[in-house]
Image (cartoon, rainbow, N blue to C red):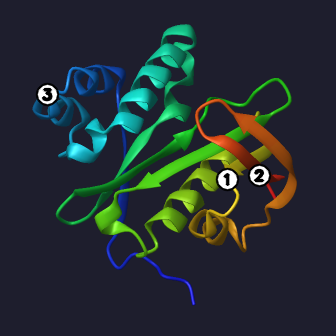
Amino acid sequence: MTNHPATPLRFVELPAAAMTALLGKDLVKASALAGVELTDYFLNDSAMWLWRYRLGQLSDHPDGAPWILRTLACEPAGAVVGHAGFHGPPDEVGMVEVGYAVLPEFRRRGHARAMLVELLRRAAADPGATTVRASISPGNVASEATIAGFGFQEVGELWDEEDGMETLYERPARP
């Protein structure tokens, strides 16, 4: 049985200025710049790595901003339940890789699947995207369950400097 969020969800772009404020540990400023109330989750060590990495990407390729990162707010209250995006715009062969995270207190409520649905919709809408990839650490049962039923096929493995060994899954952007 699939868990679905009971409330409407809204994706909000996390602008570079908000990521910069997060790196400065200024949650109030970052929230104001993002237009949603961010939590301490956005200040943890792995988030700090992510903001530095994404800002570097945006510095090199400002046109990639619409692909990079969004927060996910639950309506009507607007509580931020996580963040999602792609590792960048379509590459030279049309591949985009999804990435998403749900705050611990909001897990197991269908938010990750809702994020994935939106990411797949975004990829399908862009003619430059031909393949969607998900990379998952072996044994991450929750992430494997999230992509189940979306047509992803295992295509190999990859050593990631940040996350270690990952299993690669891909599917056409437009099935």
Which class describes the residues within 10 Å of circle 2: few (<14), some (14-19), or many (20+)? Answer: some
- Residue at 62% x, 29% y is 88
Mark 1 and mark 3 lie on one chain; the one further toward the N terminus is: 3
Of tags 2 and 3, the one toward the viewer is: 2
Mark 2 and mark 3 lie on one chain; the one further toward the N terminus is: 3
Residue 122 percent coordinates (x, y): 61, 47
Question: For the residues marked 2 and 3, what is the alpha-carbon distance in whole angstroms?
Answer: 37 Å
Asked if the residue under mark 2 is in contact with the one under mark 1, i.e. CB atoms within 8 Å, the reply is yes
**The residue tagged with tag 3: helix, strand or loop?**
helix
**Residue positioned most to the left:** 28
- Residue at 36% x, 29% y is 48
Res. 36 mark: none
Question: For the residues marked 1 and 2, what is the alpha-carbon distance in whole angstroms?
Answer: 5 Å
Quarter of the image where the N terminus is located: bottom right
Q: Amino acid at mark 3?
A: Lys
Name the residue carrying label 3: 29
Residue 115 percent coordinates (x, y): 50, 58
Q: Nearer the viewer, residue 43 or 139?
A: 139
**The residue tagged with tag 1: helix, strand or loop?**
strand
- Residue at 49% x, 63% y is 112
Asked if residue 173 is positioned above or below residue 152 in the image, the reply reads: above
**The residue tagged with tag 2: helix, strand or loop?**
strand
Regarding residue 18, the answer to whether it shows in the image is yes
Q: Amino acid at mark 1?
A: Ile
Asked if residue 91 is positioned above or below residue 174 in the image, the reply reads: above
Name the residue carrying label 1: 136
Regarding residue 173, the answer to whether it shows in the image is no
Name the residue carrying label 2: 167
Asked if residue 89 is positioned above or below residue 157 in the image, the reply reads: above
Q: Nearer the viewer, residue 94 or 136?
A: 136
